[in-house]
Amino acid sequence: MGIRISGGRVRGVCEYCGECVYEADLSEDEIDIATDRLNAHECAEQDPDWLANDDPDPDPYSDSKTGVELVRVVRDSGIVKNEAEVILAQFRGAVEIIGEWEKRAADIEVTDETQTAEMALAKSARKEVAKARTGAKKLHDELKADSLRRGQFIDGIFRVIAAHAKPVEEYLEKQEK
């Protein structure tokens, strides 16, 4: 990454793709964060505010423990922000349901067996959370399968390249001697 810093002004052009440009006025602390992220070849599809902040804007996930933890997972993943957002959006329904019940569950307290309404609410809530979790697991499996196929495809490409390169290398090595 070609990065120039001048008086709090950061300008970077991605050496990886040669097209991405990042330019912003940043504080000294933000410059270190932005430089680290730019050096990780995160392309300028990401908005400068996200690159400049130590924590990306957690909205719409900031109102639950699950959401806040997911923001940390996105930040630490090394995945380009736009791609991470697309993946995370697919889990949004489950995150919202689980986040809602993280907050509301403590309000349901059954202290004796006559509280049938509270018991019914607890049962209904448990089933809703379980349905959100199992739906997220199904989506997880589908997305992982796509990633696995992509990895297998990349492995296949390399195997072909390696298989064709090896005999050429061996022939050329014999010619060296």
Image (tube, rainbow, N blue to C red):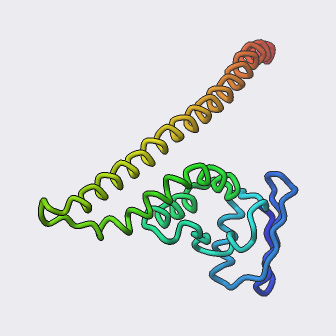
Depth check, front residue: 76 or 94: 94
Q: Is residue 101 left or right of residue 1?
A: left
In the displayed orientation, state which residue is furthest to the right: 19
Residue 164 lies in quadrant: top right
Residue 165's x, y, as percent?
Answer: 75, 19
Where 170 falls versus 100 (above or below)? Answer: above
Depth check, front residue: 1 or 170: 1
Depth check, front residue: 98 or 49: 98
Tally the marks: 0
Residue 74's x, y, as percent?
Answer: 57, 58
Depth check, front residue: 144 or 116: 116
Q: Is residue 96 left or right of residue 89?
A: left
Residue 41's x, y, as percent?
Answer: 72, 56
Q: Is residue 20 left or right of residue 81?
A: right
* Quadrant of the drawing holding the C terminus: top right
Where 48 falls versus 29 (above or below)? Answer: above
For image coordinates 67% across by 58% down, the residue present is 81
Residue 152 lies in quadrant: top right
In the displayed orientation, state which residue is furthest to the left: 112
Where 75 falls versus 79 (above or below)? Answer: below
For image coordinates 45% across by 68% down, the residue present is 64
Q: Is residue 31 left or right of residue 122?
A: right
For image coordinates 69% across by 77% down, the residue present is 31
Residue 47 lies in quadrant: bottom right
* Quadrant of the drawing holding the N terminus: bottom right
For image coordinates 52% across by 71% down, the residue present is 62
